[in-house]
Amino acid sequence: MKIAIIGASAGIGLQTTRLALEKEHEVITLSRRDVPLTDHAKLRKVQGSATNSNDVRAAVEGADSILVTLGVKSPFATTLFSDSARILLQTIREMGSSPTLIVLTGFGAGDSWGYNSLPVKLLFTLLLKAVYADKNEQEQLVAGGYPRWEIVRPGRLTNGVMTGHYRVLDNLVEGMRVGAISRADVAHFMVAQAEKPTYLGKYPALTY
């Protein structure tokens, strides 16, 4: 199948690119920086911006699934997540296609905020409040503007190895614990969902 990955130069995006290629999918990436992978017969790289409609179209046209794995390094206010969601949804509408859209946010976005522990809430308030405000808007745009979506909310990300063994929590329950999970296992989940989506219209949280 053909998988487009937006935000593929590092982190989970790079991990999903590697895994999708290992599974012999055709992969098109979009990122500002070059994706640090050697040339591959099934890999096409688009170097550009997730907020530029021409770049987005070049990356996602003809895709069966689109994985959005954008991230920022700064805790300061941003509109990257919401702006890119608007551009992507408009591009999909103009193409007249219906790929599966799998969007990475994080546990603490949207209505999952209230289910974090008190220490995590304090951390979010002090360091991540501005970033997650835009992720909240990103989630609202995707869920309200397109029928074939999944929003993936991993817990605290680590650089651990891929195990393929983790919990997927698709309901918010009082007292639930969403802790650490490796970026590699988040990539494992996202590629598996690209192949066979089983959480459409849901917000699966990932943790060990």
Image: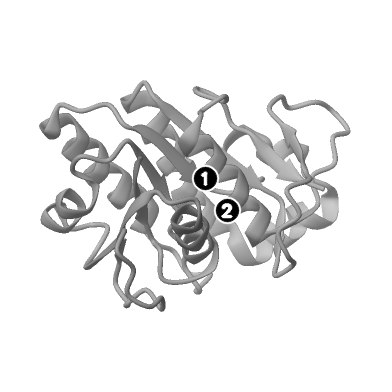
Q: Position of residue 36 (x, y in %)?
A: 41, 78
Q: Position of residue 113 (x, y in %)?
A: 67, 41
Q: Position of residue 45 (x, y in %)?
A: 26, 66
Q: Nearer the viewer, residue 139 or 92?
A: 92
Q: Quadrant of the rendered structure where residue 62 is?
A: top left
**Can residue 79 be seen in the rendering of this structure?**
no
User: What's the residue type where badge 2 is placed?
Assistant: Ala
| Residue behind mark 2 | 187
Marks 1/2 in contact by CB < 8 Å: the verdict is yes
Please, is residue 11 above or below residue 118 in the view?
below
Q: Residues within 10 Å of mark 2 (few under 14, many from 20)?
A: many
Q: Position of residue 44 (x, y in %)?
A: 26, 62
Q: Is residue 155 left or right of residue 2?
A: right
Q: Nearer the viewer, residue 112 or 121?
A: 112
Q: Secondary structure at mark 1?
A: helix
| Residue behind mark 1 | 191
- Residue for point 39% across, 48% down: 25
User: What's the residue type where badge 1 is placed?
Assistant: Val
Please, is residue 201 above or below residue 79 in the view?
above
**Can residue 94 be seen in the rendering of this structure?**
yes
Q: Is residue 8 left or right of residue 105?
A: left
